[in-house]
Image: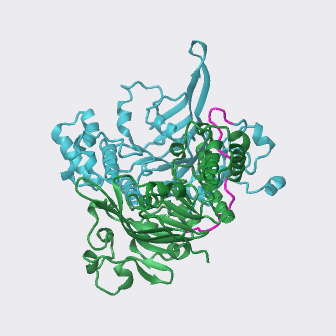
Chain colours: A green, B cyan
Amino acid sequence: MSGSVLNISGLSVDFATLRGPLRVLDGVDFSLEEGEILGLVGESGSGKSVSAMTVMGLLPDTARIAAGSIRLGGRELVGLGRKAMRPLRGRDMAMIFQEPMTSLNPVLTVGFQIAETRMLHFGESEPAAMRKAVEMMEAVGIPDPAARALDYPHQLSGGMRQRIMIAIAMAGEPRLLIADEPTTALDVTIQAQILDLMLDLRDRTGTAILMITHDMGVIAQMADRVAVMYAGQIVEQAGADDLFDHPAHPYTNRLLQSIPSARHRVDRLKIIPGTTPSPRDFALGCRFQPRCEDALTRCLSEAQVLAQYAPDRLVRCWRCFEPAEGVV
Amino acid sequence: MSDAPLLEVRDLSKSFVVERGFLGAPRKELHALNSVSFTMAEGETLGIVGESGCGKTTLGRMILRLLEPSGGRILFQGKDITGLSQRELRPYRRAIQAVFQDPFSSLNPRMNVRAIIGEPLENFGASRADIRRRVGELMEVVGLRPDMMDRLPHAFSGGQRQRIGIARALALNPKLIVCDEAVSALDVSIQAQILNLLADIQKEFGLSLLFISHNLGVIRHVSHRIGVMYLGQMVELASERELFEAPQHPYSRALIASVPEPDQRGNRRERPLQGELPSPMNPPPGCTFHTRCPLAVARCRTEVPEPLEIKGGGMARCHFPGLLNHSQLESA
């Protein structure tokens, strides 16, 4: 048993504001096994990116971990200082972002930026690291890698830059790769190439991937398990097949029905009324209740926990457990 | 209703000079749009779909007359409006309105909602009382509370701001609204609300919509007919059903196949399209798609495909429309 690569429990994050601390992440639990892809999906403000930044130790100074634990390969990250976090980034865990242009250094060649990781974490000499960088570029599908290694980021297309970001992330042979909207800025035919590349890397290296996106289609294609976030909490967690075939939480269910599909046409989209709340306006009781058509009386005042609904399946919803009680 | 279509676009082209040489002679040109033709009927939604750099936004901006065409004509209700002066354009500006992508940057942050929605009315000489009444009506149409009309845009969420943009577009009773990525910046749950609103408004006012988007699910949902664009050309034009059930151009087929869908898990059925978009500065000879086309043959590399009529009355710019594999080509 290799155990979990990443184990998060009870994680809460507060942001300091003029009106006091604001809880943007509230009691988040999830774990990732070796070679597993967990999809973290939600709309803006749901807390999915804050989760990633917290794991990477990249929260801004105004934010603070209020509670919980983050264990990476058995090692507790909560409470580690900046200095202790630094060697972990790039080596034990790596991250790729939505916009590769802003995360690459514009004045260094892309080959050197990949080689840097090798030199830093494996003590390789520059020539050896550059040879490795060219190999990595070939592995992520960059044509003529030896020549491209000497290019600067602005000389490459968006799709090629994202391949470089993936090569940099994989150069440290991390056990955990966090991908935050990695294909959102890309055209759909290029997105298909990058998603295939990520699946292929997972198969070859066994790295665990935390895939963060708002795109249910991307999640469906990539994820083994899915955690759906709403208003700073996980509201449903299940295997991908279960989640997409039989969504249990009313939010997951309605969200899936509100997506217009390229495969079949419906006359009218199902909608979720209202708007996604900001952390200042989270409702009492169930946070989705103001927009939920199936809300019960107790949903107005009592917060439900993320509870076992079926084997390997968690749901935060009173209604799922007491379908018989009277509707509001 | 007259026999002329509401909008007709004939061989519309646009090139931008990227670099000038001696005495300002163009040295390098970017062909953003290359001989695009189509018509739109009253009450119709025409979807325009394609990836970045395909020319879809340029097309929309020319129809709005925010950009001058380099060639071709735009006819509105049978009247050629391509060479009209700003003054002659006034009635046309009224009939064609726009909704843009970003509800955060397309609304003036210092104007209240009444001024934003009322501005087009004011430009066309409405009185203050009329503006106030009409803004209230429009806010109700788009699902906003009229008592919010004195507030500034920052008091509204992204979805509400897009509703404000739609109310403004409706103010002058237009015939056609150009929607350029009008729901792309919105969360999925809000996107569905706005798409339903657009459908309601279209029905109520008999509007035509030119709906530009990169999102194939959205395009399928809103459109009656769809034009697929690639590198400045319209490569296929077909009804929603024909395009999605039996795409005739290999690019349309690859584009549709590359969309990940929640109801389609695990490995994709088709191998994704290889290669990258060529530079529009230096488009490939022959068929511009041949560098990525899995079915390209020698002819595709040299001969530019002309628009061919395909079944269902649509059009495809391909030497072999409807071809699925090479063995079919040999027997053809």
- Residue B246 shows in this picture: no
* Residue nearest the viewer, comparing B161 with A57: A57
Instruction: Please state, as top left, top right, bottom left or bottom right, where the N terminus of chain A lies in the image.
Output: bottom right
* Residue nearest the viewer, comparing A220 with A32: A32
Q: Residue at x 59, y 40 (%)?
A: A153
Pinpoint residue A51: horizontal percent, then vertical percent.
43, 62
Pinpoint residue A41: horizontal percent, then vertical percent.
47, 64
In this rendering, the answer to whether B60 lies above or below B313 is above
In the rendered view, does A309 fall on the left or right side of A173?
left
Q: Residue at x 73, y 57 (%)?
A: B324
Residue B187: quadrant of the picture: bottom left
Q: Residue at x 51, y 80 (%)?
A: A312
In this rendering, the answer to whether A267 lies above or below A89 is below
> Is the magenta region chiefly helix, strand or loop?
loop
In this rendering, the answer to whether A279 lies above or below A309 is above
* Residue nearest the viewer, comparing A104 with A326: A104
Instruction: Say how many tags the image has.
Output: 0
**Is B25 within the magenta?**
no
* Residue nearest the viewer, comparing A246 with A321: A321
Pinpoint residue B121: horizontal percent, then vertical percent.
26, 38
**Is B269 within the magenta?**
yes
The segment highlighted magenta reads: B263-283
Instruction: Please state, as top left, top right, bottom left or bottom right, where the C terminus of chain A lies in the image.
Output: bottom left
